[in-house]
Image (cartoon, rainbow, N blue to C red):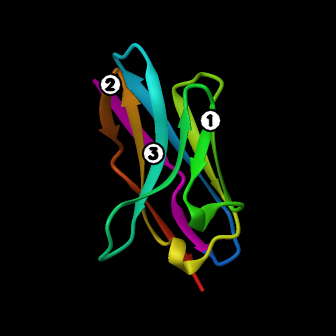
Amino acid sequence: QVQLVESGGGLVQAGGSLRLSCAASGNFLRINLMGWFRQAPGKQREMVATITSGASTNYAAFVKGRFTISRGNAKNAFYLQMNSLKPEDTGVYYCNTLADMQQYWGQGTQVTVSS
């Protein structure tokens, strides 16, 4: 079982930055994939960025060049640095992991970008 705890959401003006953090804890052998997803009101949840255990990254087209996903030195924490935020980036951001071949979700953190 893996528990994920997110932090770092909040309210920011357009053009500003936020850094989201996700910490994984519990009993697991290996985390294979970490990622960030988001869900705007009335829309489906969508992938934002992922990073593998080998540090390969993948980004949605709408965040390329603005967001950066990274892993912490302890390997059980990962981050999403969000720059040049736009109002359309508003939503609940969820961290996600694939650990020991099972998928886990965090509780979500609200990001609101004002125009």
Q: Which residue is mark 3?
A: 6
The residue depicted at 55 percent of the width and 79 percent of the height is 87
Sequence order check, earlier mark of 1 and 2: 1
Horizontal and vertical percent position of residue 57 = 61, 41
Check residue 34 for magenta coloring.
Answer: no
Query: Does the magenta segment cover residue 2?
Result: yes
Q: Which numbered disc covers residue 101?
A: 2
Q: Is residue 114 above or below residue 32?
A: below
Give the Cα distance between marks 1 and 2: 18 Å
Asked whether disc 2 touches disc 3, contact meaning CB atoms under 8 Å apart, the reply is no
SS at mark 1 in the image: loop
Label drawn at residue 41: none
- Compared across the picture, whether 115 is left or right of 6 comes to right
Residue kind at label 2, given as amino acid type? Met
Picture coordinates of residue 70, whole percent (x, y) = 64, 39
Of marks 3 and 1, which one's residue comes earlier in the chain? 3
Question: Type of residue at label 3?
Answer: Glu
| Lower sequence index among marks 2 and 3 | 3
The Cα–Cα distance between marks 2 and 3, rounded to whole angstroms, is 21 Å
Residue with the mark numbered 1:
56
* Residue 6 versus residue 55 in the image, above or below: below
Within 10 angstroms of label 2, few (less than 14), some, or many (20 or more) residues?
few
Q: Amino acid at mark 1?
A: Ser
Q: Secondary structure at mark 2?
A: loop
Write down the quadrant of residue 46 in the picture.
bottom left
Magenta highlight range:
1-12
User: Residue 51, percent across and down?
Assistant: 56, 38
User: At x 53% / y 71%, what residue is drawn?
Assistant: 89
